[in-house]
Image: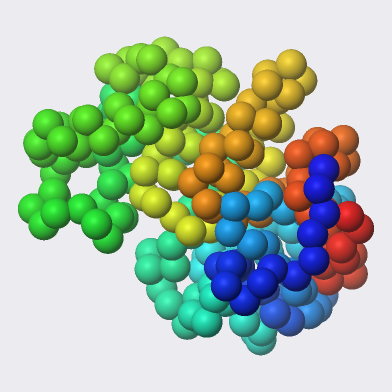
Amino acid sequence: MTTSAAPPASVPHLAVRGLHYQYPGWPPTLTGASLEVPAGTSAFMLGPSGSGKSTLLRCIAGLETPQSGEVVWGAERLDLLPTHKRGVGMLFQEPALFPHLSVWRNIAFGLRYRGDMPKGWAGSALGLGRLGDRKEALRWLDLLQVDRPDARIDELSGGQRQRVALARTLAAKPRIVLLDEPFSNLDRELRDELGPKVKAILAQQGVAALWVTHDRDEAFRLGDRVWQMKDGRCEGIA
């Protein structure tokens, strides 16, 4: 693991500043959570179940609205934008792929969220679009080493499904990727194989990645920065 100071102003980074969040009828979950993740780095968040790790990710993504605080990319207030305009991708324990679409069409579905796709793309993910959509999907599958573009999702192993889910996420060209224990349902050998590969791909794409995990060994082995959630706040521990 490598550690680093605050990113230079010239390096784009995710900044979470003083987030407070409370579910109705419950004690506060976030009580001033703050952290920074520069582009091209992976930060890991540790903490027990119920400590607020997943809530933090949901606030960054726009799935929950904090009572106060800011989520910023560079000089842009992401918390003022709707979810689909934040440039945030998420990867969960369960890949949440579309079982009725083939592997490559699952990837093509992510292209609809990209700002650089030509007009008239609509319908591509259902097989109604241009050959270029398949070519772009195959490029991401090749990057993630998935060689069954026409397979059904239920024909893939757990590790292959997570690779497809990551390919779909990256195909949308997010600037931030949030990973909520994406490999926790896989066996240790596969987790140890996929973790470094995924981190390297995220760094190659210049993505600011925030991982949630219970696995301290994984966090310190892969994390450029390591935080822990304690009393609703983010404490840097490495």
Q: Where is residue 73 in the image (x, y as percent from the top left)?
A: 54, 73
Percent across and percent down for residue 228 are 86, 58
Residue 15 visible here: yes
Image coords of residue 24 (percent x, y): 69, 76
Q: In which quarter of the image is residue 109?
A: top left
Reply above or below: 87 against 120. Answer: below
Task: Say whether residue 79 is visible.
Answer: no
Residue in the foreground of this view, choosing between 89 and 13: 13
Quadrant for the N terminus in the image: top right
Q: Residue at x 73, y 81 (%)?
A: 18
- Answer left or right for 105 relative to 227: left
Q: Residue furthest bottom?
A: 68
Q: In which quarter of the image is residue 32?
A: bottom right
Give the residue displayed 28% in from the left and 47% down from the top.
111
At x 26%, y 35%, the residue is 136
- Could you say which is closer to the camera, residue 178 or residue 193? 193
Q: Where residue 231 sits in the image (x, y, percent)?
A: 89, 69
From this view, report whether residue 45 is shown above or below residue 170.
below
Q: Is residue 160 left or right of residue 37?
A: left
Q: Residue at x 59, y 52 (%)?
A: 40
Vertical placement of residue 70 versus 136, above or below: below
